[in-house]
Amino acid sequence: MKWALLIFIITTPLLTLGQTPDIFNVSDVVAGAQRTETRYFLASGQWSDDGTAAGAASVEVHCYQAFGFCEVAHAFLVGGQPSVALDTFDILRWDKQELIAIDSSPICLVNNLRADFTAKKVTLSSTSKGVKGDKICVALDADPNALKTAFLLGVNDELNRAAQLPQKKAKSTGKK
């Protein structure tokens, strides 16, 4: 697992060129009934692997340094019906360059959240825990789409992607 996290940390900056969330903000706030001062991170956009059905503002990331956790809310469709999920991540590291947090609560996977404060990029990746005795975990390990990296995109990224679709379609049909 340490090697997977190391590879994730090294390769993620190379993969995130061009992705920019709609909101990317780091600030100092006061939170909670105890009025605790904390560094706060907020990002909003859409995961790159969600397609067009999720919507441009289907993800929000909230992180609180003093409390040591992040929450990621994301909307999606299940059988054509809108749904929402809230995932919690434990912060492993928060410095001037980046925030790294993990969610190891799933049986088969460890989810890694990374915010690059310099490049203003957010990524989410999943790594197998290597569970062998569980049929679902074995199936996930065999599915290349299950262990992926997604990038938090903004409206401009979606507009650029939509503008490139007619060009790609014309190339695939041989039209100019």
Image (cartoon, rainbow, N blue to C red):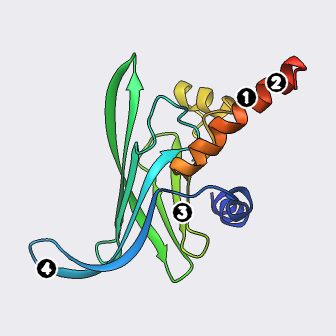
Q: Residue at x 45, y 33 (%)?
A: 54
- Identify the residue at horizontal 41%, vertical 47% (top origin): 59
Residue corresponding to mark 1: 166
Which quadrant, please, contains the N terminus?
bottom right
Disc 4 from disc 3: Cα separation: 27 Å
| Closer-to-camera residue (84/173) | 173
Mark 3 vs mark 1: which is more N-terminal? 3
Q: Position of residue 44 (x, y in %)?
A: 42, 55
Q: Which residue carries the number 2 mark?
A: 170
Among numbered discs 4 and 2, the one appearing first in the sequence = 4
Q: Residues within 10 Å of mark 1 (few under 14, many from 20)?
A: few
Left or right of 16 in this view: 53: left
Q: Amino acid at mark 2?
A: Ala
Measure the alpha-carbon separation of dots 3 and 1.
Answer: 33 Å
Quote the CA–CA distance across marks 2 and 3. 36 Å
Few, some or many C-alpha atoms within 10 Å of disc 2 (few <14, some 14-19, many ≥20)? Answer: few
Which callout, 2 or 3, points at the residue further toward the start of the chain? 3
Q: Is residue 128 visible?
A: no
Q: Identify the mark at residue 35; answer none if there is no mark.
A: 4
Q: Quadrant of the C terminus?
A: top right
Q: Decide: marks 1, 2 in contact (CB < 8 A)?
A: yes
Q: Position of residue 20 (x, y in %)?
A: 57, 58
User: Secondary structure under badge 3?
Assistant: strand
